[in-house]
Amino acid sequence: MKYLLPALALGLAGMMTSISANAQDNTVHHQAWSIAIHGGAGTMDRDKMTPQQQADYRAALQVALDAGSAVLRDGGTAMEAVQAAIVIMEDDPKFNAGRGAVFTWEGDNELDAAVMDGRNRSAGAVTGVKSVRHPILLADAVMKDGRHVFLSGAGAEEFAAEHGLETAPPEWFATQPRRDSLERLKAQKLTAFDVDHKYGTVGAVALDMHGNVAAGTSTGGLTGKRWGRIGDAPIIGAGTYADNRSCAVSATGAGEYFIRAGVAHEICTRMRLAKEDPQTAADRVMAEVKELGGDGGVIVVTPAGDAVFSFNTQGMYRGRATSEGVNEVAIFPGD
Ligand code: ASP
């Protein structure tokens, strides 16, 4: 009897699972999930990256992709998956977000991040944060709090302290290669792009089994940025956007152009109103960015499960996975 009851309970639970699975047969499309991630776009030359460097980036992208995929496969939300992938890349010094962020002109690491939930278009964003280990989680806390969408600098830090976000000292974020880039930029009077040859912002977009999309982006911005410069990443509609009626987008590139073109929102709007497919919408908006003089790339996921990339740079660190068995990471075009 002692063993029979749990067995009966298990049997019943099994039956209930299959009943609810049957009951959902007419909404099969909601069982699909997909995720796309990026770790920046730019001048990635096969000949200039050693095989080891290429393997390291691919492995790092795969770890982040796997973390996000696992959340979705287990029935978690798109927002949870996006954050699971991004926190890993924020801790990885290879990417320009969290640890390994680029330096400002003054020699600090100032971090920007944003999240957006496609269910109800709630969003949270932060800029100019210096001591929060995971800016993406701070953006999430701003969204959950709900009173404001976008917090900056000292106020954002104060909010982080009140909400118990994990902090890290300046040494955590600062890495020598990024410091060297700042020195080179100053000594040779280079632009951020000339000195780095690539953008290392990280982002993720996802569709969960419940049919909801979400987007997140995290960055250190551009090397040598000054005067409290804010890029596109934390600006809702520029570098980050999500709307269940169309898609979820995260961008990387020359932020000023992405702000001017309203890239992420524009892609969603083209899909929603002009009924463009995600690849066409993303390609057309990236062409606009190019026309203005900017470069970079985007990742897009739709409620139908598409996961697409579009970039007008030589390469983009990227990856995608779906419930249909797609699981790939890539750096160069045609990878
Ligand atoms: N988009 C970022 C910015 O302009 C830079 C990047 O993509 O790495 O701040």
Image (cartoon, grey):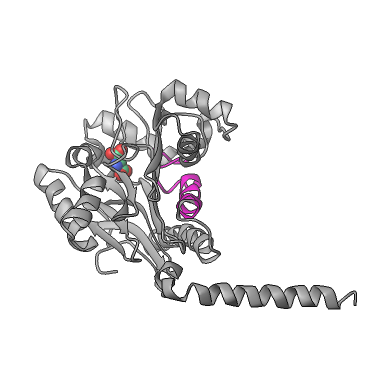
Q: Is residue 185 left or right of residue 180?
A: left
Residue 328 shows in the view: yes
Residue 49 shows in the view: no
Which region shows up in magenta? 80-101
Q: x and y percent of residue 296 in the render?
A: 23, 49
> In this orientation, which residue lies closer to the viewer: 119 or 306?
119
Please name the residue shown 32% across and 24% down the image.
228
Q: x and y percent of residue 176 in the render?
A: 44, 38
Is 86 colored magenta in this rendering?
A: yes
The quarter of the picture where residue 166 lies is top right
In what quadrant of the picture does the C terminus appear?
bottom left
The quarter of the picture where residue 221 lies is top left
Q: x and y percent of residue 28 in the render?
A: 43, 73
In what quadrant of the picture does the N terminus appear?
bottom right
Above or below, 89 relative to 102: below
Q: Single out the residue that lies furthest toward the left.
A: 291
Q: x and y percent of residue 143 in the render?
A: 45, 37
Please name the residue shown 81% across and 73% down the image.
6
Is 147 colored magenta in this rendering?
A: no
| Quadrant of the picture in which ligand 1 is shown | top left
The quarter of the picture where residue 225 lies is top left
Above or below, 263 relative to 313: above
